Amino acid sequence: MSTDNNDFDGQRRAFLQVAGAVTVVAPGVTLIAAQASARPAGEPASAANRWGMLIDSTKCSPDCKACVTACKQEMGLVGHDRPRTDAQYIRKLEVSDPSTGMRHSLPVMCQHCAKPACVDVCPTGASMKRADGIVLVDRHICIGCRYCMMACPYKARSFTHEDQTDQKPYLPRGKGTVEACTMCVHRIDAGRQPACVEACQSSGGGAMLFGDLSDPSSEIAKRVSTETTTRIRGELGLDPGVRYQGI
Amino acid sequence: MRRVGLAILGIVAFAAAVLGGSATWADDGRPAFPVAKGGHCVDDIPVMRRNHFAFLYHQRDETLRLGIRGGKYSLKECVNCHAATGPDGKAIPVNAPGQFCQSCHEYAAVSIDCFSCHATTPDSAGAGKTAAR
């Protein structure tokens, strides 16, 4: 049964790749979002995918905040000049080795763990992992207890303290609930890349790579299988979907 | 003849309510609200009136938890069709007084919290067109 499904997925992927190529070639077509991985309407997220990121900290400059800016703009995050409580889905971290003086700059966001601690501790089931590995907050049933914020070793989640207006249609967010990086799930479902990765590649250092870790033909899968990569707090065994290089 | 006169009066009052934007009630005491943009709703109007919340309640879990996009019912599409445009060319929030959602909810004394999180106007940049529903 699973073999059949894999076969079907393979055929569909091949077809979509051809379709995507045709779309690019066809004159007058301006569909930027036409990528091979757009999921058809009505189809649920599949466990055959495992979305992940690979971040090369050697290409990440301490001065560059392209990913952070792009995230705030995409998600409509408005600050209130209160850095300790303002919502942040992605932040730049400066780390150094005191014994050698070696310094790194790297973006840290929700690591989309395969065994997420935030999901374990959630008393209502609001903190959840989608079939394709994306960890989300179901704000419909989030009671704002913030257990998940305490459980997360990556400090990835924020709490919405203020009433919100002018939210993005694709990212509902409101007072009294917890929120975090969604890996731009609305873009992924439309076959696009997360906003931070797009910004890093276009105006940043090209340090971020997004893709399907379960697809052996994807660039990210090829790179993690041939190059040394590490995960932050890997010893916790949470199996994050975000991997780093050069740290 | 009298009935025709009343009907015309009703239409005029309705149009005044729509164009004026301030009046919430038609002359028969029922809610008045802006007409949706073009086409027709995803389902029959009586069905939508009675069941839209159940449809959306079901769909929200499918979209968020299962990742099913492009379903028949979608709050985002409600807003896209039913948000009126003000004189300044900007969309009026659907939960503002007299607008599509709020006029009926007020009439039925329903208090919803959909719009404490969900956008009340279509995406101004048009990003909603390209983003998945």
Image (spheres, coloured by chain):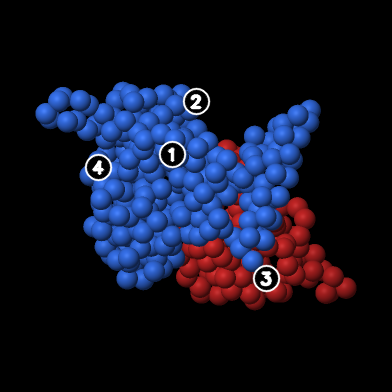
Percent across and percent down for residue A167 are 47, 48
Q: Which residue is mark 4?
A: A82
The number of numbered badges drawn on the structure is 4
The chain assigned the colour red in the figure is: B
Q: Residues within 10 Å of mark 1 (few under 14, many from 20)?
A: some
Q: Which chain is blue?
A: A
The CA span between labels 1 and 4 is 38 Å
The structure residue drawn at horizontal position 32% and vertical position 43%, both measured from the top left corner, is A231
Q: Is residue A152 left or right of residue B7?
A: left
Residue linked to disc 1: A224
Badge 4 or badge 2: first in the primary sequence: 4
Numbered badge on residue A202: 2
Assign a secondary structure to mark 2.
helix
Dots 3, 4 in contact, CB < 8 A: no
Disc 3/disc 4 C-alpha distance (Å): 43 Å
| Chain-order first, disc 1 or disc 4 | 4
Q: Are marks 2 and 1 in contact (CB under 8 Å)?
A: no
Subunit bearing disc 2? A
Residue that label 3 marks = B48
The chain that hosts pointer 4 is: A
Q: Amino acid at mark 4?
A: Arg
Q: Amino acid at mark 3?
A: Met
Amino acid, disc 1: Val
Marks 1, 3: nearer the viewer:
1
Residue at disc 4, secondary structure: loop
